[in-house]
Image (tube, helix red, strand yellow):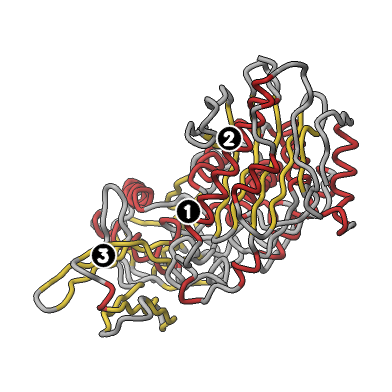
Amino acid sequence: MIKTPNTAISRRFFLGTTLAALAHPALAEAPLTSLRPKDRGPDFFRKSIPSAQQLVDQANLGGDVGFAVVNIQTGEVLEAMNAEVALPPASVAKAVTAGYALDSLGPEHVFTTRLLATAPIANGVLDGDLILAGGGDPTLDTNMMADLAARAKTAGLREVRGKFLVWGGALPRMDLIDPAQPDHVGYNPAVSGLNLNFNRVHFEWRRSGQGYAVTMDGRSDKYRPDVTISKMRVVQRDLPVYTYASASGYDDWTVARGALGKGGARWLPVRKPELYAGEVFQTMLGAQGVRVKHPQVISTLPETVEVARISSAPLNDILRDMLKYSTNLTAEIVGLAASVARGGQPQTLAQSAGQMNDWAHQGLGVMNLGFVDHSGLGDQSRISAGAMISTLMELSKSLDIKSILKEIKVRDEVLRRLDPPDIDISAKTGTLNFVSSLAGFCDLPDGTELAFAIFSADTERRANIPKAERERPRGASSWNGRAKNLQQALLQRWGHAYSRV
């Protein structure tokens, strides 16, 4: 369905009719005519701008393309194609999650990691158990662990006679975000109330004699503590490159010798996040002269006294980084924390995402959101371009979501016959194999503010990717490149067509 440029409708009408159209499959057909800008008289420059349909045809993506662009001040739908067709949003889902977290927790919310004791410290001695208790901080890293260990020493801790325990029960625990992803990709780690280094371990290898020397560590820019919670064995084979198995107390990895070459490194996901955080903290305490036993996981907290604590940056800053770097773990953690703060008791990411869908419906008036997680990593999530714009407009009004979105640069090689327009874009990108999305705001030179969403997906092609090829399937890189070029071309078209300057 196409909304032609001279169709002026109210913003409230847009919110209602665009979303309601999802119930009518016939409206999801591709347009029969090319989209063209409003006739502005003898303006030969604007007539030279390719139509949106031409740009979609040139991209040659297959699958589905849906987009819409709206003048925020007037509510006018300037252009739309398949705006009511629900498609996978990929990481554009994180923009909705950011709004959900801000509304539920507040921009100044901080996540606190505590060090607790089951008895008072007397003359430097803890005659009881020491507990590292996570508060759901998605940004906790090894540097912060070192800081917490130093604070424990400052608090007088010198010796621990009891156990060293770790607790991640502030949030529900999952072994991974999306079970359809390959085992070894670092962007699909476990989720817990105690997370460290985005639940990733650094694997490095180098030639050593006739074999390889391998290391597994929880590094930061200052420290490189070795870990045994993740173990790697080099195996004589070519494929698969990696295998994973959950062993008693550690993650058991193997890597194909034929894939290693001379040397290299990569981040692998951690599946036992509480033990990982505990082992790194054990090392940091040791550097302060405090020896503790190997960590043990507990499910409930006993009565304790606080020894030390460390807190994250404010939520607003965390979300800005999440939207910039598109960290999946951060999205899942803040989404779960928002659901818990609203009184929910989700046991799965899908349950928590369902609460977010309800929030969007009841709080924003946006219907037909179908998220299955908070990061967009799961390709079963669905939202239409129309619903995405409605969500962004509501979040911009109530929570200033625009201020934490990422600045997107306009490239000058996309529409070669036209100079790139002087526009400012604040948006969230999203990429999965054969899925590409972009949604946000576009400021034109004359002060006009646009809201837009562009979704492209070849879901059939994605569904047919063999598991062994899911990290880098054939044809995905070129497809996603063409999809991103289409996004740039549409933005440049709108910048030229709808600015009065």
Quarter of the picture containing the C terminus is top right
Location of residue 269 by image quarter: bottom left
Q: Picture coordinates of residue 44 (x, y %)? A: 67, 20
Tell me the residue that label 2 is attached to.
Answer: 404
Residue at horizontal 53%, vertical 69%?
176
Q: Residue at x 64, y 30 (%)?
A: 49
Res 386 → quadrant: top right
**Residue sitting at 38 percent across and 80 percent down?**
240
Instruction: Tell me the CA gap for discs 1 and 3.
Output: 31 Å
**416, above or below 469, in the image:** above
Q: Could you tell me how far apart the alpha carbons at marks 1 and 2 are, in whole angstroms?
A: 29 Å
> From this viewpoint, is residue 375 visible?
no
Mark toward the viewer: 1 or 2: 2
Crowding near pointer 1: few (<14 within 10 Å), some, many (20+)? some
**Residue at the disc numbered 1:** 114
Residue 211 horizontal/vertical position (percent): 15, 78
Three-letter amino acid code of the residue under disc 3: Glu
Q: Residues within 10 Å of mark 2 (few under 14, many from 20)?
A: many
- 199 relative to 48, above or below: below
